[in-house]
Image (tube, rainbow, N blue to C red):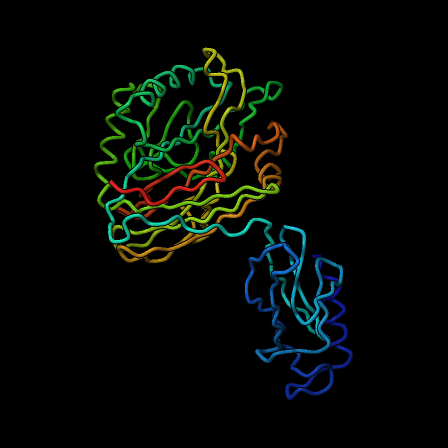
Amino acid sequence: MKFASLLAAAVMLVSCTGTSDDGGEGGGGSVNAVLKIEPDKTLFQSDGVDYVTLKVTLDGVAVEDDVVFYQGKNPITVKDFKFFTTSAGDYEIWASHGIYVSDPVTLRAISVPIPETPKDSKPSSTEFKSRVMCMQFTGTACGYCSQFMSRLKDAFDKESLKDEYVKASIHNYQYVASNPDAAFLQWEWASQNLKVTDLSTGKIGKVTNPSIIMDYAYGYYLYNSISSTEFESYIHEMNENKEDEACGIAVNAKLADGQVVAKVTVKAAVDGSYRVGAMLLEDGISGKQINGEEWMNTHDGCVRHIDARYKSDGKESYYGHSLGTVEAGKTADYIFIWNLDDIKDANDPNNYWDEFVEENLRIAVFVTSVKDDAYYINNAVQTKLNTSIPFEYR
């Protein structure tokens, strides 16, 4: 819509003056010629020194004169086709040349330098430590969740499960809006768009509370009848089943000026096609748990954001961003960049959340792959922000 007026004017100009296919009157190209901006990169530092070079082409031929650049509706100065800035954020840039208008490109300026991958202590090894991702669907107004929370605590407190799992709590149950859950995620996002499927039960998407789903599709769907001993055995079994094919995951995550920048490096144990996703978690969120004990009123590992959206054949799921095919022993990188203000705006539409407590934030990263025609979480790790975690070996 914001380009409609200019586009309409361009169409009127073409209609009035005409342009021949052999480069006649009207600017040097055919009426159907395509103007493009081709940036040499889309991620750069907002330090006023780093810059993006914007190459402009008309039907593939470089244009070096009479180009006007815009951000939104406003023309901007881009000297020598180099875009600088001292303000972090996303910049949607487009250009005009005579009667021609380009599609916009999005450039992201960050104030945090791209972190380095932590040093690999065993470059020739692929025997990685394996963990199970446990995703708990819950809410402070959930009447039965307190019983389930007790059983989960009994399991997670066991020494035998230490460092065997990554747990994320998705607060998707909001019963009384007058007493809001400070970790609540809107229902459509948490339960319908986060399409968690389990092969053994066929449950898809919408989740009944209390529940916990382990390793996405290829795993177990557990309801309130599970005992802590059974839960413990499930985690051990899943880790044993996948440890020989588990990827290594190295993470270096930085937080500054309200921006999270995390470099994730995935090292394959076996040849395969892999995807990577990440969650922003927050600990120490206060909220009265109905029917609960005092310790239940502090909620840890609460999901604030998931960056893993994957679209295929018109369907949306959260299996992660493609890393392509990675050979055994080889690595692939992915960079996650988040603005905390943007996360709150997108995931807290009812304004239930308090402000982020930065020292309570951490990142959980998971890698997915396909097994038995279903995505499952191949491995997962977590770390505090402004810290790093190298590949972990058995």
Percent position (x, y) of residue 232?
A: 27, 25
Which quadrant, please, contains the N terminus?
bottom right
Residue drawn 75% across the image and 63% down it: 75
Between 225 and 283, the one nearer to me in the picture: 283
Residue drawn 56% across the image and 25% down it: 182
Percent position (x, y) of residue 72?
A: 71, 57
Percent position (x, y) of residue 155?
A: 31, 21
Looking at the image, residue 179 sits to the left or right of residue 145; the answer is: right
Q: Is residue 63 above or below residue 162?
A: below
Which quadrant, please, contains the C terminus?
top left
Residue drawn 64% across the image and 86% down it: 21
Q: Quadrant of residue 164?
A: top left
Between 36 and 30, the one nearer to me in the picture: 36
Q: Is residue 229 above or below residue 216?
A: above
Looking at the image, residue 140 sits to the left or right of residue 130; the answer is: right
Between 68 and 197, the one nearer to me in the picture: 68
